[in-house]
Structures are given as C-alpha cells and as structure tokens.
Image: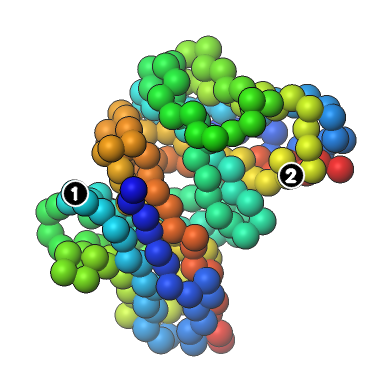
Amino acid sequence: DTAVSQTPKYLVTQMGNDKSIKCEQNLGHDTMYWYKQDSKKFLKIMFSYNNKELIINETVPNRFSPKSPDKAHLNLHINSLELGDSAVYFCASSPTLSYNEQFFGPGTRLTVL
Amino acid sequence: AQSVTQLGSHVSVSEGALVLLRCNYSSSVPPYLFWYVQYPNQGLQLLLKYTSAATLVKGINGFEAEFKKSETSFHLTKPSAHMSDAAEYFCAVSDPGSNYQLIWGAGTKLIIKP
C-alpha cells in the first residue's frame, strides 16, 4: 500500500564511499523529485524528473547522479561521499509537473563518518 | 524570484490553545500555496493547499489557512491544539516560472505544552 517508498531508511558509511538510494512510487505519477533536508530541517530541491526526463537540476555537486529507469523509479547515486552529505534525503512524486501537490517518501537518513 | 518566509522557527502553545503559524510569500503571479506537516522521523504530508478558489482553506486534522493577497500571507491556524500536533510545519509556494518547483519556507517547529 506504500505510495512512495525509499530504501534504505538508514545509511551509515565512510567518507569516500559510493552509495545509492532507491525510490519507487506506485501512484502512477509522471513526476518525481529528490530533496535534501539538512540538520536545521531546511529543504532543498536537488532534482526533478518528468516522464524520465530531467527537468530540474539545481546546484548540486556532480557527485550526485539521479537515474530514472522508468516513471515509477528515481534512484540517487552518490560518489565519493563527504561529511557534508550527511542529511535526510526525501523522494517525492506528483501526478504531473504542474499539479503542484507532492507526495513524499519516508526519507533516508544518510550519515557519513 | 519567489520566496517564502515563516516567522518563528519555534512556536510554543499550551494544549487547547489557538495555534497560529505565520507564512508570507513573494510572488509576481497568483500563487499556489501549501502547508505541509512533518512528524518526527517521517516524510512530509500535505495539510492543505490554496489554488485560487476559496480564500479560506480547510485541511486535515482541524487546520485551516486564509489566503490574504493584500498582505501576501497564508497563515495556518487551528482553534485548539492537541499534543499530537507537535511537529514541523512547512509553508511552500509553487513557481510556474521554474517548472512549478516548490519554494519552501524554513519551517516552524510547533511545541505543545501540557
């Protein structure tokens, strides 16, 4: 029944490692997003995809690479992890790009040691 | 560029008291406005949204917000706070000029005192 799911929920890793976070939505939505929430709860859009096409690519280090194999999935791969990458990463989806309301996943808490 | 300002990073009210969380926006076009709630260790959930219909919008859990164009405000209220309302609340505005990206406020943590 989960609408937007993310795996893993927690991710603890060492600096310099490469890791991926997976996101899946079973709502039939066209648009998916990745957000980063820092320790002060500030939300920052990272990427958005519409029908597997990259729409928004904010100022994010190129160590972060999103991949959308199909409309229902948007994964986030992070190379050469740094301490500053520690945050909660949220995936979200919306029916269309202009629909506005976004449905969020439960988040992945990434801790880089 | 559009922006959202939430006044007060923390708001503390007693159980049963009125909740008022403030949100002001800047927008050059009629906005779509949203309030989201984030309970501890969870994702964000939509509370309510304004999409240019009625200016008083009712949401879930007894919350409502009023769109005031003259004040560029979209404050969130609830007549009587419950302990279960303790959470982080985010105001957001949709930016059609940036592919309908949501522009987020910094969030307000609502603390409920017994």
Q: Which residue does the numbered mark 2 point to in the structure image?
A: A84
Work out whether A34 lies above or below B9.
above
Q: Nearer the viewer, residue A17 or B59?
A: A17
Q: Is residue B113 visible?
A: yes
The residue located at (48%, 50%) in the rendering is B44
- B30 to the left or right of A44: left
Q: Position of residue B79 (x, y in %)?
A: 32, 80
Q: Position of residue B90 (x, y in %)?
A: 44, 59
- The C terminus of chain A - image quarter: top right
Q: What's the chain of the residue with tag 2?
A: A
Q: Count every numbered label the image shows and give the total.
A: 2
The residue located at (54%, 35%) in the rendering is A59
Q: Which residue does the numbered mark 1 point to in the structure image?
A: B29
Q: Position of residue B74 (x, y in %)?
A: 28, 65
Q: Position of residue A48 (x, y in %)?
A: 45, 29
Classify residue A110 by image quadrant. Answer: top right
- The CA span between labels 1 and 2 is 36 Å
Q: Nearer the viewer, residue A61 or B51?
A: A61
- A2 to the left or right of A22: left
Q: Nearer the viewer, residue B10 or A103?
A: B10
The residue located at (50%, 40%) in the rendering is A45
Which numbered circle lies on residue A22? Answer: none
Q: What is the secondary structure assignment of the residue under circle 2?
A: helix
Q: Nearer the viewer, residue A58 or A102?
A: A58
Q: What is the secondary structure assignment of the residue under circle 1?
A: loop
Q: Is residue A3 visible?
A: no
Query: What's the residue type where badge 2 is placed?
Result: Gly
- B40 to the left or right of B6: right
Query: What's the residue type where badge 1 is placed?
Result: Val
For this orientation, the residue located farthest to the left is: B53
Work out whether A31 lies above or below A89.
above
Q: What's the chain of the residue with tag 1?
A: B
